[in-house]
Amino acid sequence: MDWRGLTTKPASSLDLPCLNEAGLSDARLFDGGPPDHLDIVRDYLRARRGRTQLLPAELFAEPAWDILLDLYVSHIEGRCVSVASACDAAAVPPATALRWLDRLVVLGLVQRAGNFDDQRLSFVDLSPTALEAIERWVEDFLLAARRGGAEG
């Protein structure tokens, strides 16, 4: 159990692609996902962040979606994402981000694994279900953009 009473499985019991057998970060670029998907999601995230330069940030708080998209980019790039980094991606206060991250774990959209060398550090990644859902969303987004009506 982690410090909040949540079950955190050791890295060896979860298939987090960015962790090696010892539960240590093993960042590498993945071949997974169509190449344009990574660029599309990066651009989409950049555009979402840009809105806050024009209007108040609190109008755009969507922490779960921000976490999922950031984890998607990191997954495709083969980068491990710490809980702290995932919370930063949410662009909301840390306690709020943690609640959303915990909710995503409970819903089975995010997997969480501990680090054997430092149990205080946990990593998160998309579950296969979330990865498939985001891939579908990107395909739909691209299709809508080609038709002239991208929806986000």
Image (cartoon, rainbow, N blue to C red):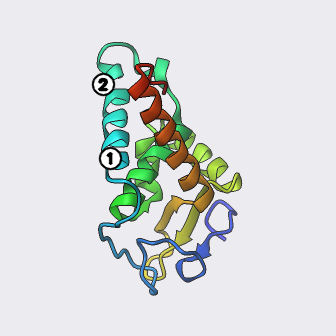
**In the picture shown, does residue 98 fall above or below 13?**
above
**In the picture shown, does residue 87 fall above or below 9?**
above
Please tell me which residue is depicted at 44% across the width and 77% down the height of the picture: 118
**In the picture shown, does residue 118 fall above or below 147?**
below
Q: Which mark is residue 108?
A: none
SS at mark 1 in the image: helix
Pointer 2: residues within 10 angstroms few (<14), some, or many (20+)?
few
Q: Nearer the N terminus, badge 1 or badge 2? A: 1
| Amino acid at dot 1 | Asp
Looking at the rendered image, the quarter that the N terminus falls into is bottom right
Question: For this view, does 73 lie left or right of residue 133?
Answer: left
Question: For this view, does 13 lie left or right of residue 117?
Answer: right
- x and y percent of residue 151 in the render? 49, 24
List the single residue furthest toward the top: 55
Query: Badges 1 and 2: C-beta atoms under 8 Å apart?
Result: no
- x and y percent of residue 8 in the render? 62, 70
| Amino acid at dot 2 | Gly
Please tell me which residue is depicted at 50% across the width and 71% down the height of the picture: 16
Of badges 1 and 2, the one in the foreground is 1
Pointer 1: residues within 10 angstroms few (<14), some, or many (20+)?
few
Please tell me which residue is depicted at 30% across the width and 67% down the height of the picture: 29
SS at mark 2 in the image: helix
Structural distance between the alpha carbons of marks 1 and 2:
21 Å
List the single residue furthest toward the front: 147
Please tell me which residue is depicted at 43% across the width and 23% down the height of the picture: 147
The residue indicated by pointer 1 is: 36
**In the picture shown, does residue 76 fall above or below 98?**
below
List the single residue furthest toward the bottom: 21
- x and y percent of residue 134 in the render? 52, 46
The residue indicated by pointer 2 is: 50
